[in-house]
Image (tube, grey):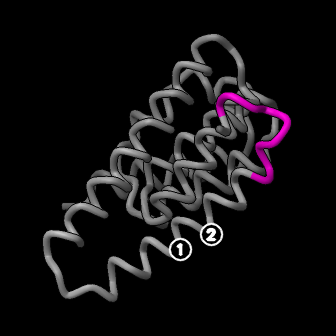
Amino acid sequence: SIHEQPDNRTAFLGQLQSVVNDIVHDQRATSNQDRKDAIARGLASGFAYTAETGQQAMLKKDFHPAKDMFQAGEIIMPESAWASYLLATADAQMGDKKQAIEELKKALDKGMTNAKALDDSAFDKIREDAAFKALAEKLRSKSKQP
């Protein structure tokens, strides 16, 4: 629905957050391992869809829909460094330096270790920003650690 009805994205993201909260609660509460696994697969599938759809939008330079899809991905997999990284790429492309830096910080905090990911052309608009440079240096030093 986020992809198909752009005027309702904010409402859909709120509904998605509520549904994901319920599903995660169910996953934690159940003792049935098959059910836990099925929920995990469903969440992973939903995340993959948002990432792929968002990346397709990025290729078309449709940055707002891409950001919406990446936000949905971050709702589905809030612990994912990849989700925050993808959101940072959309923010950077849209020229929102502050938000892109915040998302990159979250990605690092969630365990991002691939310094080469910052070579993505999506960050060209913010590459010279002092905060971006500091994050890039932090990531480079983090990726060199054993």
Q: What's the distance in space between the residues labelled 2 and 1, CA to CA?
A: 5 Å
Q: Residue at x 65, y 31 (%)?
A: 3
Q: What range is drawn magenta here?
A: 3-11
Q: Residues within 10 Å of mark 2 (few under 14, many from 20)?
A: few
Above or below residue 67? Residue 106 is: below
Dominant SS in magenta: helix
- Report the amino acid beneath label 1: Asn
Q: Is residue 7 magenta?
A: yes
Pick the front one: 74 or 18: 18
Residue 46 screen position, x and y as percent: 42, 46
> Mark 2 near mark 1, Cβ–Cβ under 8 Å?
yes
Residue 28 screen position, x and y as percent: 33, 84
Q: Which residue is mark 1?
A: 21
Pick the front one: 26 or 116: 26
Q: Which residue is mark 2?
A: 18
Q: Residues within 10 Å of mark 1 (few under 14, many from 20)?
A: some
Q: Quadrant of the C terminus?
A: bottom left
